[in-house]
Image (cartoon, rainbow, N blue to C red):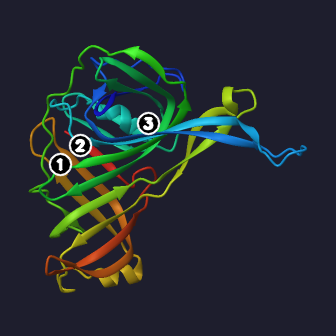
Amino acid sequence: MFLTQNKILLIKREAVYGTDSAPTVAANAVDAKGIKIDYQYDVLPRDIVRNTLSPVAPIIGQRSVEISFMLEIKWSGTKGTVARLSDALVACGLAETVSAGSSVIYKPTDVAALSATIWLYELQDTGNCRLHKITGAMGTPSLVIENGKIAGIELKFQGIANDPTEAAAPATPTWETVIPPICESATLTLNSVALIAQSLKIDLNNEIVKRDDLNSAAGLKGFALVGRKPSGSINPEAVLAATYDFYADFKAATSRALSIVIGTAAGNKLTITAPKLVIDKLGNADRGGIGSHDVGFELVGNTGGDELQLKFE
């Protein structure tokens, strides 16, 4: 019997696209939740004419796989040292800049993005397990930030499908010991104005497409990141125009800078900045009897490849 709670997820960036990077439970296990895997096989009907109305069995064509899960936003505990979350970020089209002893910064890349290998162990109560291996995985991230809670990053990857295998359970994983920060005292500002908001969501909205190939197994070379359209939402308390004129910014499509800080401990602090946020939706809402704004927005580039920055320090 498989136990839904007993799973181990590993993720490791690939040196060569589609080549299994062989993640290990000692170095690449991540704290994930809401794991869902979906094998996407093209079922090809055989609508041939015979002397019967009974259908002929279909056959399977192109094959791929999609996996989604959420990771806690936490870092290595050491400034300028990457965390296990880093391999998921670079496989979502974010370029990594490491400044030893100082910070690790991620920004959207305009060149070929890296990929990752993802292994998922599903354990039985007998001690055996099923192992899913996904290679050439590329994805899109969504940051979910709510007051008083643990910040998370929802991830959806597409990759090359490999047949699941039966295996003995791996050794006990080495998990990260850093505790994620709580979303509080976050210094949230828009255009340098402090906002009283309950939640913020930012979605990179990467466009991941298949690379069809007659020469490749299953007719699939892999996947490529070909575009992005970052967007998000925020729900600040309603204020007078003298404090912040949301309506004027919406009407004029004025771009404003967004900033928020999560955590305070060295090696476990994240500063999110977006230099040009443009409101594309504005409405009134009720947050527990307090009037608020329902604000949707797009993030656009300033000089290019800089519409969003994640700085861990």
Residue 83: percent from left, percent from top: 26, 30
Q: Is residue 61 left or right of residue 245?
A: right
Residue located 23% across and 43% down the image: 73
Q: Earlier in the sequence, mark 2 or mark 3?
A: 2
Report if the CB atoms under discs 1 and 2 are less than 8 Å apart. yes
> In terms of depth relative to the viewer, which is nearer, 41 or 75?
41
Q: Which residue is mark 1?
A: 150
**Which amino acid lies under the numbered mark 3 shown in the image of this protein?**
Ala
Q: Secondary structure at mark 3?
A: loop
Question: Which callout, 1 or 2, points to the residue nearer the camera?
Answer: 1
Q: Is residue 57 left or right of 84 when viewed as pictured?
A: right
Residue type at mark 2?
A: Ile
Residue 58: image quadrant is: top right
Mark 1: which secondary structure?
loop
Badge 1 amino acid: Ile
N-term-proximal mark, 3 vs 1: 3
Q: Position of residue 214 (x, y in %)?
A: 75, 31
* Residue 91: mark: 3
